[in-house]
Image (tube, grey):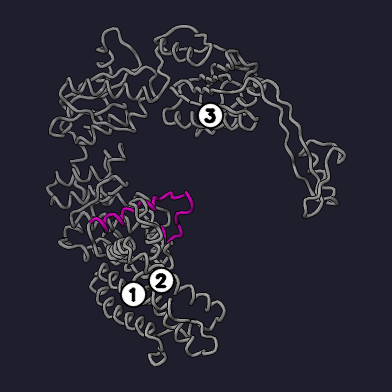
Amino acid sequence: MAEFLLELLSEEIPARMQARAADDLKRLVCDGLKAAGLTFTAARAFATPRRLALVVDGLPVARADVSEEKRGPRVGAPDQAVQGFLKGAGLTSLDQAEKRDTGKGEFWFAVIHKKGGPTAEALPGIIEAAMKALPWPKSMKWGSGTMQWVRPLQSIVALFDGKVLPGSIAPGGKMAPVPFGDTTRGHRFLSKGEITVTGFADYAAKLRAAHVMLDPAERKQVILDGARVLCAEAQVSLNEDEALLDEVAGLVEWPVPMLGTIDAQFMDVPPEVLIVSMKTHQRYFATTKADGTLANRFVVVANNVARDGGATIVDGNERVLRSRLSDAKFFWDQDRKIRLEERLPALKDIVFHAKLGSQADRVQRIAALALAVAEHVPGSDPTEIMTAAELCKADLVSGMVGEFPELQGIMGRYYALGEKLPASVAEAIGDHYAPAGPNDRCPSAPVSIAVALADKLDALISFWSIGEKPTGSRDPYALRRAALGVIRIIVENGLRLPLKRFFKEDDLLAFFAERLKVQMREKGVRHDIVDAVLSLGGEDDLVRLLARVEALQSFLGTEAGKNLLTAYGRAANIVRAEEKKDKTLSAQLAGAPDAALLEQAEEKSVASALAEVERTVKPALQREDFAGAMQAFAGLRAPIDALFEKVTVNVVDRPQLRLNRLKLLNQIRATMDSVADFSKIEG
């Protein structure tokens, strides 16, 4: 068994593309190996800012001979089908094929023999095919070449069993091919000259000696550990950010964390501004004090080992940061000179959507929705809700949000507080985009709830009205996220909000139902139980709906619930089978059975139990005691078991009696279906 090592060295690969590209290279090469009949034991891919690397272990030195059969058209098929079969099988005439009787007629078969040969002969073609198929989000051509790659390609290491593979990759045009070789380069600044390698272990060791950490996971850990140590020494805590950590690890081949200081003149700027500015523009990590407030220290990760211990690097980064934060402080100071209310006319010049008007139009819709929602939010103040709704988008025309769009809402909150507006109004402005994701906190204050719901409901209602609905994986206006946000706000705050009041489109409520099912599945609720409750139709109170789901799941977890579900299935299956035979039967089965035709004690016992259940269930449902409603069904188990044991339903020679007994079974089904559609429940 042998090892295959591939490295593609280029100019700097964007950090966001590295992990995906390494995975794609591994997938494409492994698929190519399998297609060539080559087995292997393991494959590992790596990425640094300048290289993609792949090592495949356990490859055979030579491929075995293989034979495969290919079935062709039926004997006597049209010549076009025959010629297509011959071409696909690599045959020149039917004399090279076999005629076989398959039991379903005679068909042509081709037996294709493929000679094995050295594995090394197959690898160059696999490398080239993988490189051409690798799906970069953005790629480029360079020089006079025609080849598409993320950045100009510099060299290719291609070793199999310690030997250089024959071949090269041609960029096209007048550019010379990039040959397969056994040499690479180390760190751009901390190493010199080419490095010759003999295999993966040698490759990884020599790269490390040349200041290149090949494994992104190792680079991340070095950054994290080093930053934590520096912060502990400075008595601050690292503001850990997984996305930023991934990005920074993709910017350096030899990470060296260093600690810098934020100039005191900027510490009165809102911490969110400082954090976003440091992260977005400089890829710095923020730090916090013991009380959780922003500290005046930041972590920068250098891609170099400085002779002076990093003093020059830190000083340079502090100067760059001062320049960045000077802009932020300017926007902060200037924005506070204009009141939020004075910014509202400018919203008319911002198009929300060509078919839905401006942001000013949207604000009017949000305000109207917020007041309607407020009727169902205990403790809400209509005056404060109207103020917050009218001002919630005002910061979109501020200098700070123009520079940092991710701060919309956040800056509006600060400006509102600076104007001495009620705290509830300021918090509602800051919260109205929330929750932005599954881990984001939900608004909980009455004014915040009303405005946040109105913002999301307007997006859903408006885009639905112009036919812009999510389809498949396409959701350009994040309507799925908006629906999940509405669900979370309602459920987590226990709001009794009748959604039908706001939705003119029935399929919008169905869209909510699908999002609810997704959310419930993530919480471990069985999808069939959610389906059973949703199938009742017409329920638009999410709190009540989820209470039904919880009660049903609890009931079905008991022995009585499981047994009753079995009994329901028996009754429903008999009725369903008879309805299929007679399409007019459904109408005849409506209503209660005729008490005078109940002959056996078991029939009477079931009828009596059903009547008792109905007397208990209806008031329980009215007072939303769904657990009590479910428990009432437990009394049906014994009578129904006895019914199926002692009573013959299909009494063929007595049609009236047969119909009455079917009505009794249908009543079992209808009574249980009053709380949930039990036919949707699996098992």
How much space separates mark 1 and mark 2, taking CA atoms? 9 Å
Between 169 and 654, the residue placed more toward the observer is 654
Circle count: 3
How much space separates mark 1 and mark 3, taking CA atoms? 61 Å
User: Where are the magenta residues, as a range?
Assistant: 463-492
Under circle 3, the secondary element is helix
The residue under the point 42% across, 57% down is 355
Between 53 and 74, the residue placed more toward the observer is 74
Q: Amino acid at mark 1?
A: Leu
The residue under the point 40% across, 50% down is 477
**Residue 384 locus on image (x, y percent):** 16, 57
Q: Amino acid at mark 2?
A: Ala
Q: Which residue is mark 2?
A: 567
Q: Which residue is mark 1?
A: 636
Q: Earlier in the sequence, mark 3 or mark 2?
A: 3
* Picture disc at residue 25: 3
> Does the magenta portion include 472?
yes
Under circle 2, the secondary element is helix
**Residue 534 locus on image (x, y percent):** 38, 65
> Does the magenta portion include 239?
no
Q: Quadrant of the C terminus?
A: bottom left
